[in-house]
Image (cartoon, rainbow, N blue to C red):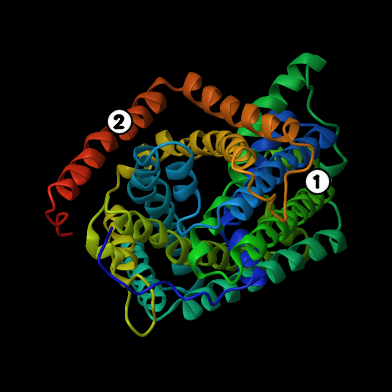
């Protein structure tokens, strides 16, 4: 164990947890993905059906994580579930992928996306990488000031995103449908081919809904986490489902299935139908705001995993250090910011990120299995049932597990490179983990972080 006696302060409640959940899910994808789905389906009811089905899967995942949080309110969230249900090496593999890919890569992509929309919006002639660097550095500093400051900034952006998306929905209901909305849908082929297209489209939809798991990283700073975290997860996921469905409804109303399939910027086209060229600038501001909020969320939550790893003695021990006044893991926060900044200057990293993003669903599947493991252990140990339990378990948990495995298999089968890069990344984590274990067992200090 790391030799730092200070502990994280519990300053966050269910509302914070819910906003963190929503902030971890909603990025810029919802403003682009409706057209991606429409390009495969072309039928309004099928498009909405896929988004509803994706919301159901997200809710099933939320149920699983809510019960995991109620049964094991441990620091580090999903990292701790992997450690306690299986083996610390599995937990290390998860934290390893967060730092090198999932969180850091997502943050770099969000920062660059923000820069790409913000610079032309305000006429700022600054290189996107430089602006991304400034934003990442600024948010890193804010989160070092304290969890209340970091969560407050994240909550502010999330509230603004909700208001902005609600305004988009309102405009969509007030706008006159475009000419394409009245055109007949493109041919869809047989019913079997339509169902196949829906299955393929589910991959993009499920990724759009992913992100609820990151709220579990904040367990150590939530008041009464066994109650507040399950509530926050369920409230947050339900809120996202409502917003996503409303965005798709107005896109279909204004553009129609055919128009939606032939645009790369559906939200922009919805606003343009109501207020002309000004709509394009407004949607650019909305996307910039959304990506900035997502970035704030990721910098807030992910360093808590590295802190938990360091406390377990399987990572750089300096990452477990907490500032004596703010009680936040500023070294872990600084490391997260530094890795994300480095990735923004690594142009080829985007290709690697595309290959390994499906690793999230590997651990979603393991989380479902972990729930079965914890239930069996708690029954054997006569541990009282938690306040929240997954409805219709084991059927709903098994369904989520099947879907998660299906996503992994589908993405890997479609791209051998995806499978090889992801497998290689996970395998490299094993010797690194045992190197830290060997150093700890010899009674020496773990390596000093660069």
Whether residue 265 is visible, yes or no, is no
Q: Position of residue 246 (x, y in %)?
A: 79, 54
Residue drawn at the location 61% of the way across and 65% of the way down: 17
Taking depth in this image into account, of 71 and 230 the one nearest to the observer is 71
Q: Position of residue 191 (x, y in %)?
A: 82, 17
User: Is 252 left or right of 105, judged from the image as shown?
Assistant: right
Whether residue 193 is visible, yes or no, is yes
Residue sticking out furthest to the bottom: 325
Residue 449 is tagged as none
Q: Position of residue 166 (x, y in %)?
A: 76, 66
Q: Can you tell which of label 1 and label 2 is closer to the viewer?
A: 2
Image quadrant where one finds the C terminus: bottom left
Residue at which label 1 appears: 252
User: Which element type, helix, strand or loop, lies under badge 1?
Assistant: helix
Residue at which label 2 appears: 427
Dot 2 crowding, Cα within 10 Å, few <14, some 14–19, many 20+: few
Image quadrant where one finds the N terminus: bottom left
């Amino acid at each position: 164990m790391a030799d730092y006696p200070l502990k994280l302060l519990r300053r966050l409640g269910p509302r914070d947890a819910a906003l963190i959940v929503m902030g971890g899910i909603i990025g810029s994808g919802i403003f682009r993905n409706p057209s991606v789905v429409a390009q495969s389906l072309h039928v309004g009811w099928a498009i909405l059906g896929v988004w509803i089905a994706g919301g159901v899967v997200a809710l099933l995942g939320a149920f699983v994580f809510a019960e995991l949080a109620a049964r094991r309110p441990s620091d580090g969230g999903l990292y701790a579930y992997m450690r306690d249900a299986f083996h610390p090496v599995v937990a290390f593999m998860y934290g390893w992928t967060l730092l090198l890919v999932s969180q850091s890569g997502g943050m770099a992509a969000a920062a660059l996306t923000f820069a790409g929309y913000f610079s032309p919006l305000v006429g700022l002639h600054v290189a996107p990488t430089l602006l991304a660097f400034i934003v990442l550095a600024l948010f890193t500093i804010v989160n070092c000031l304290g969890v209340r400051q970091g969560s407050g900034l994240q909550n502010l952006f999330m509230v603004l995103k909700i208001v902005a998306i609600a305004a988009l929905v309102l405009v969509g209901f007030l706008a006159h449908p475009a000419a394409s909305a009245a055109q007949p849908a493109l041919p869809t082929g047989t019913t079997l081919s339509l169902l196949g297209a829906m299955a393929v489209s589910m991959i993009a939809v499920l990724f759009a809904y992913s992100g609820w798991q990151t709220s579990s990283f904040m367990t150590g700073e939530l008041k009464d986490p066994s109650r507040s975290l399950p509530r926050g997860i369920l409230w947050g996921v339900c809120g996202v489902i409502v917003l996503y469905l409303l965005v798709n409804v107005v896109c279909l109303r204004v553009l129609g299935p055919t128009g939606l399939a032939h645009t790369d910027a559906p939200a922009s086209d919805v606003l343009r139908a109501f207020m002309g060229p000004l709509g394009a600038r407004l949607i650019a501001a909305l996307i910039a705001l959304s990506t900035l909020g997502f970035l704030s969320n990721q910098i807030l939550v992910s360093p808590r995993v590295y802190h938990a790893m360091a406390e377990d003695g399987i990572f750089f021990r300096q990452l477990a250090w907490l500032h004596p006044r703010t009680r936040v893991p500023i070294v872990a926060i600084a490391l997260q910011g530094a890795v994300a900044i480095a990735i923004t200057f690594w142009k080829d990293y985007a290709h690697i990120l595309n290959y390994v993003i499906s690793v999230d669903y590997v651990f979603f599947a393991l989380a479902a299995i972990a729930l079965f493991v914890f239930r069996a252990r708690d029954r054997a140990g006569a541990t009282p049932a938690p306040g929240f339990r997954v409805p219709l378990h084991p059927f709903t948990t098994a369904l989520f597990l099947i879907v998660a495995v299906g996503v992994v298999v589908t993405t890997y089968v479609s791209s051998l490179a995806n499978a090889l890069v992801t497998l290689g990344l996970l395998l490299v984590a094993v010797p690194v983990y045992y190197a830290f274990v060997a150093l700890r067992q010899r009674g020496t200090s773990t390596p000093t972080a660069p």
